[in-house]
Amino acid sequence: MVEADHRALDFHLSEQGEGVRAVAHFPSRGVAGVVMMAGLWLSSAPPLQAQTAIDVTIKDHRFTPADIHVPAGKPAVLNIKNEDATAEEFDSSALKVEKVIGGGNEGTVRLRPLEPGRYPFMGEYHSDTAQGVVIAE
C-alpha cells in the first residue's frame, strides 16, 4: 500500500556538500499524482536487456562447455562452478575479464554485449588444459 501526504508532487534537486539529493513534496493531488509521476519516471528509464545465463563447469582443469555460444549484441552471464579441489582463474584478454574461482566454489562472470566473433579464454593456473572460446553470433 502506498501512503502519501496529500499536497502537490514537486521534485527538485538541492546541493549539499559534494553530493546532490532529490527532494519530493506531495501537494494536494494525492496518490493519483504520485502514481502518475512514478509512471512518467519509469517510462523514461531505458529498457533492461535480458541476459543469457550459461552454466560452465571446471573439472579436471577443463572448462565444460569449452565452446560457449552467446547472442551477439546482448549481455550474458557465465555461472562457473569449479569442481576441482584447486583454484582456477577464468582469464580472457579478448573479453577483458579475470576471475579467480576457488576449488569447490562458484563464481559469476558478466559479459558485456559482444560484436559477432570469437573470444578465447583460458584457466590461468592450468593453461595447458583449461581453454575455451566464447562465440558471439
Image (cartoon, grey):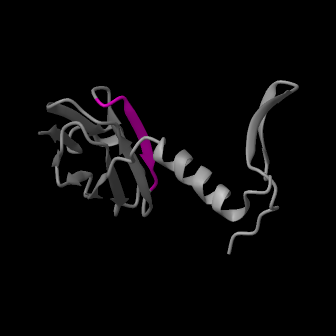
Q: Position of residue 137 (x, y in %)?
A: 11, 39
Residue located at (66% from left, 56% from top): 33
Q: Which residues are magenta?
A: 95-102
Q: Position of residue 13 (x, y in %)?
A: 76, 32
**Quick check: 52 above or below 121?**
below
Q: Work out whether residue 65 or residue 11 is closer to the camera in this orientation and state it.
A: 11
Residue located at (43% from left, 41% from top): 46
What is the chief secondary structure element of the magenta stretch?
strand
Q: Work out whether residue 123 or residue 81 is closer to the camera in this orientation and state it.
A: 81
Residue located at (34% from left, 47% from top): 49
Q: Is residue 71 left or right of residue 23?
A: left
- Could one spot residue 89 in this view of the protein? no
**Quick check: 97 above or below 31?**
above
In which quadrant will I find the N terminus?
bottom right
Q: Is residue 135 left or right of residue 111?
A: left
Which residue is situated farthest in the bottom direction here? 1
Q: Is residue 17 inside the magenta stretch?
A: no
Which residue is situated farthest in the front direction here? 28
- Could one spot residue 73 in this view of the protein? yes
Residue located at (24% from left, 45% from top): 130
Q: Work out whether residue 78 or residue 36 is closer to the camera in this orientation and state it.
A: 36
Q: Is residue 31 left or right of residue 94?
A: right
Q: Position of residue 2 (x, y in %)?
A: 70, 69
Q: Is residue 97 inside the magenta stretch?
A: yes
Q: Position of residue 35 (x, y in %)?
A: 61, 59
Q: Quadrant of residue 114?
A: top left
